[in-house]
């Protein structure tokens, strides 16, 4: 069989492969694949699509044109409708894959890495089932691949994993997660699965080959390589079928267009890594000021403006009273990228005014959580300023920020004395420098001025740190950093903390500072006092 014909078949099953991935999955040499792609493109049977993400370098991804579909149907001696229903090739499928293109690319890179240890493979995408894709190894064993996106809702993703565990049993589950905290959380959810579950940070899985030790089991094994993971895959070979689409609409060929006029499914391929990072940061910190966004990005104000301008022209970002928020279009874009519910994202984070003719106020904003942030905009801005200053200082002092979570991802839920409890900090951060890892919760306190109120603010953390959960959640015990508006309130809080720690006998790693000193010394500087030591020291001193 010629390489060109094989590539048509491969792109029929795996649309938007790039050439390196196609070479790995097909088994042909890179030279043969590159030459064949050029020949097919010249014959207008395939079309390239530029793509890059925050995790993957720029590349060109290929898909079949309408002429390519007809050629493939003729080669396989089937009707066009039958071909469309048997492969992810309909217009509906193309829209789904384009919307999820960042995740699609990550899963293709993982599949290419698997071919170093096992070949040939079979591959199948899923539209609505809880797994994203299935991979069949040469001996018939199967792997279900699941990706958890950055914007995935915790409850919704937990339900998705429940459906996964209750469904057909594969040889193993491969789960890609966005950060270390969610890796541990997802591992707990998958510990009861009937097949082995292996988890990795998405950024590590796509950047590593089959020999890198970036995977761990749900039970918390030592880190494993992909080769070692495949050796532990069970004998099961589940290969679920999905109901075919009722309508097999022939897709239209992709034509170049500008960002402003691009249809929504094309945006993931048209936005570069830098602008995707901008969207991600504004999604994390809605109503952020331009200067704070620049600090988080680590670029100048001018460069930030250059990144923002096309996003604003494409109606993805809005600037309201000097603060930046995502439009409904951008919220839908991120939700569909991560297989999350777009309507839920809009209800929570929509910044569109209910009444366009009325002035901006928290009452005139559609999203529930967006409205809450705007209602307490002074507190919101203070938290933004803290994390922005922290990001700049960390870069100067050689710290690498591994994770910096906004309030909606910083919350932790745990059981204490057979009851469900939670902590809801204003931010969570995880930093690394020369092998040292330090983590913190941030509480920016403006209303706790009475001793009883201060004790009530401490109670959730005392319960949390009375258990092993802080270490289970993070691999270490995070510091609890509390900032007060004035020094007198900070002094009162330290006295209350000493009393409550002695009463409960809980070793709470608490540090307290007044706002003025934090702004003068910066977040990592010598601004922090603990209940045991009245001397101001560095946050991680």
Image: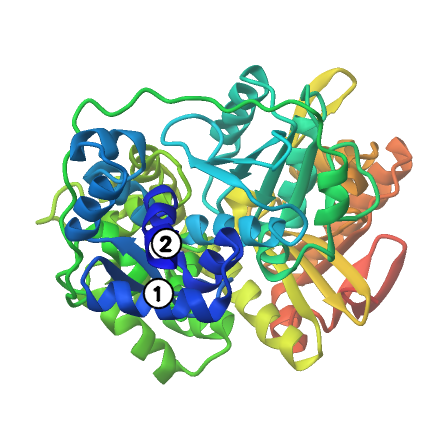
The one of 369 and 382 positioned closer to us in this rendering? 369
In the shown orientation, is residue 36 left or right of residue 112? left
The image quadrant that residue 516 belongs to is bottom right
x then y, percent, for residue 538: 78, 69
Position of the C terminus, as image quadrant, is bottom right
The one of 418 and 398 positioned closer to us in this rendering? 398
Question: Residue, x 41% and y 21% (percent of image)?
Answer: 241
* C-alpha gap between disc 1 and disc 2: 8 Å
Few, some or many residues within 10 Å of mark 2 (<14, 14–19, 20+) = many
Is residue 195 among the parts visible in the rendering? yes
> Which label's residue is closer to the chain start, 1 or 2?
2
Question: Residue, x 33% and y 74% (percent of image)?
Answer: 307
Few, some or many residues within 10 Å of mark 1 (<14, 14–19, 20+) = many
Image color mode: rainbow
x then y, percent, for residue 251: 16, 44
Question: Residue, x 87% and y 32% (percent of image)?
Answer: 504
The residue beneath circle 1 is 36
x then y, percent, for residue 60: 36, 66
Describe the element under mark 2 as helix, strand or loop: helix
Q: Is residue 72 above or below residue 459?
A: below
Is residue 277 among the parts visible in the rendering? no
The residue beneath circle 2 is 7
The one of 70 and 57 positioned closer to us in this rendering? 70
Q: Are marks 1 and 2 in contact (CB under 8 Å)?
A: yes
In the shown orientation, is residue 275 left or right of residue 41? right
Q: Is residue 22 above or below residue 80?
A: below
Q: Farthest front residue?
A: 1
In the shown orientation, is residue 369 left or right of residue 536? left
The one of 20 and 80 positioned closer to us in this rendering? 80
Q: Is residue 391 above or below residue 67?
A: below
x then y, percent, for residue 316: 25, 58
Question: Residue, x 61% and y 69% (percent of image)?
Answer: 390
């Amino acid at each position: 069989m010629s390489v060109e014909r094989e590539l048509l078949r491969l792109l029929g099953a795996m649309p938007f492969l790039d050439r390196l991935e196609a070479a790995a999955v097909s088994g042909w040499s890179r030279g043969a694949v590159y030459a064949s792609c050029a020949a097919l493109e010249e014959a207008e049977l395939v079309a390239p699509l530029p793509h890059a993400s925050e995790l993957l370098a720029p590349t060109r991804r290929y898909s079949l044109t309408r002429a390519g579909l007809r050629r493939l149907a003729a080669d396989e001696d089937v009707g066009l409708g039958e071909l469309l229903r048997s492969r992810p090739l309909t217009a509906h499928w193309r829209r789904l894959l384009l919307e999820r293109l960042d995740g699609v690319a990550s899963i293709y890179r993982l599949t290419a890495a698997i071919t170093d240890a096992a070949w040939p493979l079979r591959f199948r995408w899923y539209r609505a089932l809880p797994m994203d894709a299935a991979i069949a190894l040469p001996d018939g064993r199967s792997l279900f691949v699941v990706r958890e996106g950055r914007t995935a809702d915790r409850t919704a993703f937990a339900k998705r994993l429940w459906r996964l565990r209750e469904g057909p049993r594969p040889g193993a589950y491969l789960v890609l997660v966005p950060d270390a905290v969610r890796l541990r959380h997802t591992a707990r959810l998958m510990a009861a699965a009937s097949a082995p579950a292996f988890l990795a940070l998405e950024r590590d899985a796509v950047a590593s080959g089959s020999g890198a030790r970036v995977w761990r089991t749900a039970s918390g094994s030592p880190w494993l390589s992909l080769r070692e993971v495949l050796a532990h895959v069970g004998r099961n070979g589940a290969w679920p079928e999905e109901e075919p689409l009722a309508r097999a609409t022939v897709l239209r060929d992709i034509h170049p267009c500008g960002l402003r006029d691009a249809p929504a499914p094309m945006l993931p391929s048209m936005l570069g890594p830098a602008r995707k990072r901008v969207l991600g940061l504004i999604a994390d910190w809605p109503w952020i000021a331009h200067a704070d966004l620049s600090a988080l990005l680590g670029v100048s104000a001018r460069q930030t403006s250059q990144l923002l301008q096309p996003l604003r022209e494409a109606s993805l970002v809005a600037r309201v009273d000097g603060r930046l928020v995502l439009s409904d279009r951008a919220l839908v874009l991120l939700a569909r990228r991560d297989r999350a519910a777009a309507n839920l994202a809009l209800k929570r984070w929509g910044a569109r005014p209910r009444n366009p003719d009325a002035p901006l106020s928290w009452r005139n904003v559609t999203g529930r959580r967006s409205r809450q942030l705007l209602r307490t905009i002074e507190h919101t801005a203070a938290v933004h300023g803290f994390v922005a200053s922290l990001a700049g200082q960390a870069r100067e002092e050689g710290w690498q920020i591994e994770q910096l979570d906004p309030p909606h991802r910083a919350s932790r839920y745990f059981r204490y004395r057979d009851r469900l409890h939670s902590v809801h900090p204003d931010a969570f951060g995880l930093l690394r420098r020369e092998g040292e890892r330090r983590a913190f919760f941030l509480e920016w306190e403006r209303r706790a001025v009475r001793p009883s109120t201060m004790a009530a603010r401490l109670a959730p953390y005392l319960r949390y740190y009375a258990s092993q959960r802080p270490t289970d959640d993070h691999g270490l015990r995070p510091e609890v950093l509390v900032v007060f508006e004035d020094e007198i309130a900070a002094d009162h809080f330290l006295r209350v903390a000493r009393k409550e720690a002695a009463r409960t006998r809980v070793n709470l790693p608490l540090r307290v500072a007044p706002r003025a000193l934090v702004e003068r010394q910066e977040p990592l500087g010598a601004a922090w006092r603990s209940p045991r030591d009245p001397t101001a020291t560095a946050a991680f001193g």
